[in-house]
Image (cartoon, coloured by chain):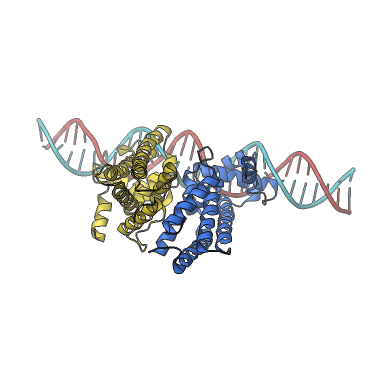
Chain colours: A blue, B yellow, C cyan, D red
Amino acid sequence: MGAAERAANEGDEWSAVTPDAARRLVSAAVRAFAERGYHATTTRDIAGRAGMSPAALYIHYKTKEELLYRISGTGHEEALRIMAAAAEAQGSATDRLRDAVRTFARWHAEHHTTARVIQYELQALGAEHYAEIAGLRRRTDRLLRQIIEDGAASGEFRVDDVPGTTLAVLSLCVDVARWFSADGPRTPDEVGALYADLVLRMVGGAS
Amino acid sequence: MGAAERAANEGDEWSAVTPDAARRLVSAAVRAFAERGYHATTTRDIAGRAGMSPAALYIHYKTKEELLYRISGTGHEEALRIMAAAAEAQGSATDRLRDAVRTFARWHAEHHTTARVIQYELQALGAEHYAEIAGLRRRTDRLLRQIIEDGAASGEFRVDDVPGTTLAVLSLCVDVARWFSADGPRTPDEVGALYADLVLRMVGGAS
DNA sequence: TCGGGGCCTAAGCGCTTGCTCAGTGGCGCG
DNA sequence: CGCGCCACTGAGCAAGCGCTTAGGCCCCGA
């Protein structure tokens, strides 16, 4: 995938949202939340970035928190989908783990703006919205743990502490969203490849 | 170290700050910032936790941002000190890397409240305060990279991408602050030991 | 041609925010 | 004893917050 396609993808990230004004608002909110954080972002700022007056926001979203909830929901569903695709594929545990880490880490680099919001602004969600998102996160965690368990059972991996290792791998991938910059020396593909290698070593598999 | 000593250590974390009221304020601010985030924390909340009126805060600190700056400065200096102690010790690169990761990850678990603030509220600092803190972070990064470079040069490690691996190791340790909970199943010592093992595998060293 | 609904804005409400300031109580020192 | 000092408080200011409301524009079917 070239830089142009990547940029197009990033722009298309919210293409399913209609009408156009609602899409512009959610896209503006993601950028603002990622830059300044949820609490430091004002509804005036979001509306301004989307090219409309502050009041227009409330035609499409009930509250500022609903905007965060939609972003968080969409993002977590996408992350879960990526993990599931790798976990449920045919192949050895080694192949599935390599694919899971490669695609999961790459997504966090590619969509680092969205990823930063969904990973680091969780606490700003209301209680029941948080609980719903926490469910998606638990499912992602279970899928990864199953791959590692399979590899340990088949003898492909040598891991003493499966839950601990799962936590570490997930933590490693998620934290990409914090440090990744599009201006940095690494492309998302390179991050995915590097991380897949590092993780296969972590589980004592063949690299 | 037992739970009682750990609790005492956590309480003593700001024992160098005087007078007593200033210490209570900084300790209250750390807890509030870690729970809710900098921007969602009010000066009234900090003062209330410290058992004083909102106005009292401004006798000891000029602004709310100065409180964050002091916390960030102290915390980053401590983290740098820990990394330096391991990096500058005698011994093989393997020994130094194991010690660095063990103590650095353990500190982020033990002091997860402070660590969360210094790692995830950085963007709330003013520009020149941020620049100062960024310098401390760069020094920490350089110390770790040197260990990995030494190990690669001596043949102890097999790493293709030294800067990338350094980034991953640092990211892994730092992110402990995000997920670690004192109520969880793991002690800080156990996290340090697990992470040291995982990282030694990542660099292709003997575990 | 014209009525009605969807989308938008200007204005502003009630409230909270970071921070200030005049005043007070109590402690140490002469 | 009395005086000065200083940590601290109660009250409150200006600014900015999330969000609401009243009204207008424009397109579309009848």
Count how many numbered circles sit on residues in the image. 0
Task: Name the side, left or right, on which B93 lies relative to D20.
Answer: left
Residue A137, can we see it? no
Residue B131, can we see it? yes
Residue D22 in picture, x, y percent from top left:
68, 45
Name which residue lies at 51% across and 49% down. Answer: A193
Tell me where residue B75 sits by quadrant. top left
Residue D30 in picture, x, y percent from top left:
89, 54
Q: Nearer the viewer, residue D1 or A137?
A: A137
Task: Name the side, left or right, on which B173 lies relative to A15.
Answer: left
> Which part of the image, by quadrant, shows the C terminus of chain B?
bottom left
Tell me where residue A32 sits by quadrant. top right
Task: Name the side, left or right, on which A109 lies relative to B150.
Answer: right
> Which part of the image, by quadrant, shows the N terminus of chain B?
bottom left
Q: Is residue A93 above or below residue A188?
A: below
Q: Nearer the viewer, residue C28 or A115?
A: A115
Q: Nearer the viewer, residue B160 or A192?
A: B160
Name which residue lies at 29% across and 42% down. Answer: B84
Residue D27 in picture, x, y percent from top left:
81, 44
Q: Residue furthest bottom?
A: A153
Q: Residue furthest front?
A: B155
Residue A28 in picture, x, y percent from top left:
60, 43
Q: Nearer the viewer, residue B119 or B162?
A: B162
